[in-house]
Image (tube, coloured by chain):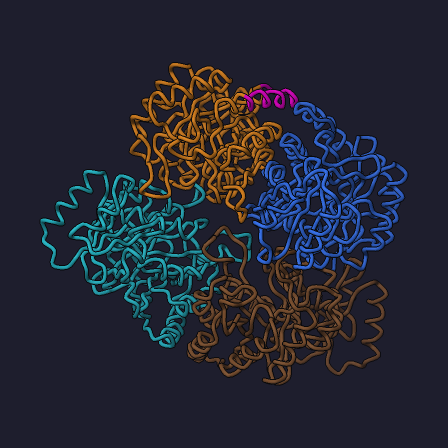
Chain colours: A orange, B blue, C brown, D cyan
């Protein structure tokens, strides 16, 4: 339920109302809706008299939010959410933002080489995994804190904000200190303890869709972060699990128009993990741009065959350059830039 | 197994060889590969001595086809298959062909109105259902033969070849006589009796992917038609069944680069059935174009709210015109036309 | 909509009513419900005045059927449907019926050997494939009519009714003449032309669930047969397609209580095709019995390693005997026989 | 790789060998295999000379473990793992262990009433949720620590060990102190940080299968716990996500024979969460027993319609008693007890 406040109303009137609602155990989220002050009201609404509220002197209108997600819903927040990191904006419906980098950070030289290559080609953010969620306990688990340091240094050198995956609350302070966008991986999309912890911080979160989660569950996961007070959530589709075996996962591009309709959050596409095969990445990247994605997250390695993990899905720097060139043309065709 | 014949070899030598192979129960398909005469060899190859064949005076090279589909494989037929219907070509890697029309043919006036509208907007082929595969025996099953007549008349008026779905061998002669491209629906993709019957005719077949079939099974279904001698198969992706409920099916656009790599057959995308919601059709159509599809099949109705079936997924003629305009720009961006 | 007729009502009154309803384009299905005459009314009911019908002199009560399937629904037909073939009854909630035999009929000796073995072990019906739906056009397609003859002879010798899969309407007369239960395979579950043809005959149909069809779609497929006038439909679960790769399909045993609640039709389980591995067949068979299945359909071969198709999922005759012994104990534990 | 040591070999010889292997960065797990001392060897085996190892004076045999999971594999540990908690044993292939209780712990009286009822009916362990993984941040999240206290008190009163779900490492010490079996929920099955933490403790872990994870991924998750040194893992199937909508999830009972073949760990079935409907629980429970499950986990509430969460899937105490009675008969039929 969204309470649209009258203009020119005295602050005292509002505070009285809010106090009354709080004592009934309801949560309130202050926001602006089409330039007007509004309050989202969440929790057990059986205790309030909507009729009485409707007639309250400070309230202009009450809007019901039908979706199970509230703060994530377009009804609650009609304008697009724009995430600003340094001089980059994600979700502003004009420039399509490219995040690129290797699956795993291997050493300072590797990440520096890749950062230089992708920066030159036009990528705006640098990604790299320091903590790796691996199916097997016996495979490479990532460089950890040292990896974050390598990534940060390479990002700083090329003035690129950095994106990396957090796997546990233990690593949170290190990520707050050094990482610009904190990624939640597909396997942790419904790790509600982690989501709650991320709701308390003030950093952008890139929330990957679980590989067998519905769009509604994904938005409910975003709602956990938003409900904690962190409004900076970027959604990232990375393929869903189906019966098909020719691709690692099935990239679900129909999320783009659906997310744009149902929510105000930016949507990014990861064609590398979805397809699991670098030969499919270009076609799926161009498709994502044409469908209206706010950005792409692409795996790039200067020597894919030597990559410590997921080499088969990495583009070379040369192929990434070609993709950027083609991507620019498709972006222009739909009135956007890349 | 593909036998590449030597150039300038005498016909007698070849005939001797073929005769020997046939007596061992093997099937032979004559074709041209990079301009050179070749023979595909199918069946139980345990009865032949490959070494001996390799040394045969008329054979230049033998290429093994690893995929379970043979005639559909790029290894067998490296050049793109181009399907020509009247003055239209599908699969020629330049012009993207748009097939449009209503889900069900309702009457002469309806199909004529839609045909006129889509023709003016730039569609090249007219589609319409005369026989409808319906989940319930109590819902509308289509106009049958009369529907085919209405469709043909509207197609003739606007010089558009027509596409319609065949549901049974009983209807085959009527379709051969009047329909330009015969569609096999998703539910009949593994109706092997029907596929065998279609292998014997000489009309283009538009083979929809079953909503829970793998790409390999789809190509094996195409192989049934090809193995019967009908080389004109167009593949059509229309969404697969997943756990997601926000869309009717999940449109799998990654089939485009995979089909282009593994086979020489044209690939068409149907975003209307996949999403089940006209509001997603534009985004998915532009994505399909950007990803390299050879064509689109789109449901259009002049009054979607009055359509006898699937009205919710139909574009109005006006929205179809807008889509065509945007589609042209994306097509140009990747060096193609629409 | 189900019209329950008053007792002791004169036939003339009823005929008048039926005539009126028919002229409005409605379909009527005569049946008995708890011993009382009733008529199922199907089609476009917007043309009738339910209030008026309610007050009609011959009508005692009107029951609405909410499910999209009508004749298949328990509301329409509260008593279990029992299918009788010779001296065997399927669906009578007491004896669990075992159908066994090879995937493919190979020759007279093979089917005779297997028939003898399974009959001795307690199987009641003999199954065998004469027409095989194969993914590849190049693999063995079955013996055809000769296979049906071999199967029939073996069935006659051991007084076992026979079950075989029909793939096309072309084969229908041969099946009507010789086969006791006609099987519709998973791939043809929504081949509506075939279902309509089977609605017109008077033979029991064993309708396999499509490997990616919902229970509702399955019952709608049954409805096609029932609506044609053939009331003898047996449902058969054979596993559904999921992401799991350790089994060929995922056997969905929860269909048993659901089918028993929603419909009056018998439900049979095929653990051989579902698991694709003979080592899982015993456990899944015992589970199906414990869950309340009306029967099992099991692949048995005297020499599985030499079977022409699907040998890996066949039980030997010896293992089939062991399964029957264990199955009897589980059947007794739930108050049934085997 | 599993090194089977010679009998009567001197400890010094063994220690020399182990030291050498450790210096090469390999991990060693001491175990007994068929009564003989053995060492599992994990990590990068490219650094060792297998031939040389084969000839080492202390080694009798080397067995290769092909599965990606090692410690979880039957090859590594042929005997069944039996988990003993107080006087109860899980996995001993005789008594089938029943875990029952409510979805959420609501208050002391509720859990006491249910505990008394299920204990009387024959349940061996008491379950109840104190921390609830909920899709929405706005729905009831559980009583937390107080819930654990209520559960423990009820368990103590009836001498029943208790099972509860852990959602975060923060709660770990409280669970170690008070809970007998720590449950990892489906959504956390690949929360690798949590799995690593649970590998370091010495309490039995009940690891639920993620609703879209393969059996192999599930065993790899178990491997994370085992590799940490905690050998007490119980696997629990709770249904997988498919296209079917008539059930909440599809219960995959074929895991029972597969788990028994591939691993030595006990397997428990949760029919309540899988079906999401109490009316399907009895049939699926009997099926699980017949298929060879080591136990069941069933939701029971004295007033299901008043339950704070998931009431629709709860059995009443009376229906639970009926299930236990029927379950006993099926257990006896397969030579086991309940």
Q: Is residue A55 visible?
A: no
Location of residue B169 with respect to A71 vertically, above or below: below
**Position in image of residue D311 (x %, y %):** 44, 57
Q: Nearer the viewer, residue B291 or C257?
A: B291
**Position in image of residue A327 (x %, y %):** 58, 23
Residue at figure coordinates x 53%, y 19% from the top left? A8
Q: Nearer the viewer, residue A274 or C110?
A: C110
Q: Nearer the viewer, residue C296 or B104?
A: C296
Residue at figure coordinates x 46%, y 80% from the top left? C335
State the image quarter where residue B58 is shown. top right
Span shown in magenta: A322-337
- Quarter of the image where the C terminus of chain A is located: top right
Q: Is residue B150 magenta?
A: no
Location of residue C332 with respect to B150 vertically, above or below: below
Location of residue C252 with respect to C125 vertically, above or below: above
**Position in image of residue B154 (x %, y %):** 87, 41
Q: How many marks?
A: 0
Q: Is residue D230 left or right of residue B27?
A: left
Q: Is residue C189 left or right of residue D268?
A: right
Location of residue C119 with respect to A57 vertically, above or below: below
Residue at figure coordinates x 42%, y 20% from the top left? A115
State the image quarter where residue B26 is shown. bottom right
State the image quarter where residue B112 is shown. top right
Q: Is residue B123 visible?
A: yes
**Position in image of residue B44 (x %, y %):** 61, 57
Q: What secondary structure do most residues of the magenta stretch adopt?
A: helix
């Amino acid at each position: 339920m969204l309470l649209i406040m009258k203009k020119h109303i005295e602050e005292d009137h509002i505070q009285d109302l809010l106090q009354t609602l709080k004592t009934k155990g309801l949560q309130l989220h202050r926001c602006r809706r089409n330039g007007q002050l509004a309050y989202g009201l969440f929790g057990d609404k059986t205790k309030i008299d909507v009729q009485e509220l409707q007639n309250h002197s400070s309230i202009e209108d009450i809007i019901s939010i039908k979706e199970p997600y509230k703060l994530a819903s377009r009804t609650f927040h009609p304008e697009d959410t724009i995430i600003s990191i340094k001089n980059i904006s994600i979700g502003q419906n004009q420039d399509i933002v490219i995040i690129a980098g290797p699956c795993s950070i291997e050493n300072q030289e590797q990440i520096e080489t890749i950062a230089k290559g992708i920066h030159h080609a036009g990528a705006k953010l640098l990604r790299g995994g320091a903590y790796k969620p691996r199916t097997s306990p016996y495979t490479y688990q990532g460089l950890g804190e040292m990896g974050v340091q390598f990534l940060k240094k390479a990002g700083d050198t090329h003035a690129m904000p950095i994106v990396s995956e957090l796997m546990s609350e233990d690593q949170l302070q290190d990520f707050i200190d050094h990482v610009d966008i904190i990624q939640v991986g597909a396997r942790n999309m419904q790790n509600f303890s982690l989501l709650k912890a991320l709701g308390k911080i003030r950093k952008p979160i890139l929330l990957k869709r679980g590989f067998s989660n519905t769009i509604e569950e994904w938005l409910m996961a975003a709602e956990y972060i938003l409900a904690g007070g962190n409004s900076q959530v970027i959604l990232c589709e990375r393929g869903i699990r189906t019966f098909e075996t020719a691709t690692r996962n099935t990239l679900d591009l129909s999320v783009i128009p659906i997310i744009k309709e149902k929510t105000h959050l930016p949507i990014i596409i990861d064609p590398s993990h979805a397809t699991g095969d670098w030969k499919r990445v270009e076609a799926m990247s161009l498709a994502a741009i044409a469908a209206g994605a706010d950005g792409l997250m692409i795996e790039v390695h200067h020597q894919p065959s030597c990559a410590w993990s997921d080499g088969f899905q990495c583009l070379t720097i040369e192929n990434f350059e070609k993709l950027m060139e083609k991507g620019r043309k498709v972006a222009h065709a739909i009135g956007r830039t890349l």
